Amino acid sequence: MKVPMIMTAGPTEVNEQVRKAMSERATNPDLDMNFFEFYKESIEKLKMIYKTKNETFILNGEGMLGLDSACCSLIEKGDRVLCIENGIFGKGFGPMCETYGAEVIYFSSDYKNTIDAEKLEEFLKLDSNFKIATMVHCETPSGIVNPVEKIAELLNRYKIISVVDAVSSLGGEELETDKWGLDIVLGGSQKAISSPAGLTYITISKRAFDKMEARKEPIPSFYCNLLLCRNWYQDREFPYTQPVYNLVANDIAFDICLASDYLNKHKKVATAVRSALKRGGLELYAESGYANTVTAVMVPESIEYEDLFNTMVRDYNIMISGSLGELYNKVFRIGHMGENASEDKIYMCLNALNNTFEKLGFKPKEKLHLSFVEEVNK
Ligand SMILES: *Cc1c(COP(=O)(O)O)cnc(C)c1O
């Protein structure tokens, strides 16, 4: 199979060292006591990325498993849940919470801007009777990072448990689980950590665990029951066999992330990508809160997104992302997270993009890749 260079909004390129680790022999994770020590050390690394002392786990499934597990384990029938949203992933929390019997109330913000914390403050003055609030840190389809710190401060004032989807921000954006007082924060292996898709990261506060323990009805799932993993170290037992090959590879991805100045690296390339695109005469989708992991760009009027995507793959072997829902065909995205937050890769991607645009009859005002080099060296 011919594999293109993946410059999408996730999954991202996986480092060779991580891929090689998948091919090393691994132990029986149910029986070998060394595995528990390995897992513990790997979790310590993840806690450093989350900036937390809270209990932290790696679940065996793609990112959505974390969202589903958090909703399933926390929510009881009739719980009022505040769904704070300004995008596709944020809004998607609503139906997921309803699956578990929540009464969902939406606080919706403009989709081109960050969530308006001042308006949320006014909203909560009138109604703050919520058990749980959900939100997304980085709205991947629009490339917007929300002010989670400010939102969490408001929620903590009213003792509302926060569930934060940080799948496309963890390891790429500033995130302070403990300092900001976040309860559940979810991450995914295939975004800024650049590990193979298939693992979910989750950190859980004592307050969130207490809510799960105090439920009247049991958690309505086996696989999504977060209480099952709570005592794994003490009991030397997981509820099911751990995917040891994936975890060993994933641990290398943590090492690579932690060995780099990852937050500054993302910020530097993202800033230069945005400047280069603007200098080329392109319009960014968002109006505020530009993400450092992904950039959403308006497809020029004269071009069809399909042609853009197909030409990039066919002629340059580079894959970019479109967008979802209402943004489909209007917006394309360049992922520059994890392994892809690389000046060389972005240069190649922007060079191909520039040439693709020219082939399709849209000539950027300045060459995208050359502007990028200037901007990134400023
Ligand atoms: C990628 C992502 C997820 C996981 O979704 P998949 O599309 O299944 O990979 C969840 N939330 C956000 C914000 C994401 O970017």
Image (cartoon, helix red, strand yellow):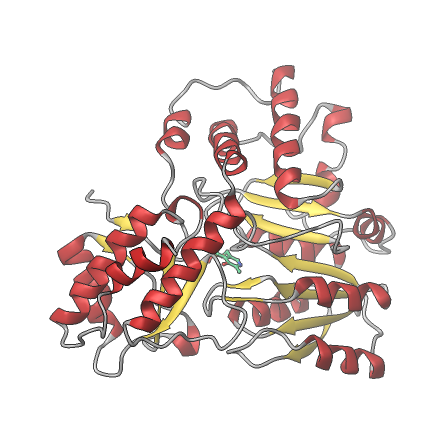
Residue 261, position as x, y percentages in the image = 51, 41
Tell how many labels: 0
Residue in the picture at 33% in, 54% down: 7
Toward the viewer: 238 or 366?
Answer: 366
Question: Residue 220's spot in the image, x, y percent?
Answer: 71, 53
The C terminus, quarter of image: bottom left
The quarter of the image holding the N terminus is top left
Q: Is residue 157 left or right of residue 51?
A: right
In this rendering, does residue 220 appear at all?
no
Name the side, left or right, on which 343 lies relative to 143.
left
Residue 109 on image: x %, y %: 61, 80
In the image shown, does 135 or 152 lie closer to the viewer?
Answer: 152
> What residue do we see at 66% from left, 39% from top?
47
Please name the residue shown 60% across and 39% down the image: 58
Residue 43, can we see it? yes
Rendered position, 334 above or below 60: below
Q: Residue furthest front?
A: 378
Side (left or right) of 156 relative to 35? right
Among the 4 quarters of the image, the one containing residue 183: bottom right
Coordinates of residue 277 in the picture (x, y in percent): 32, 68
The part of the image, by quadrant, that contains residue 21 is: top left
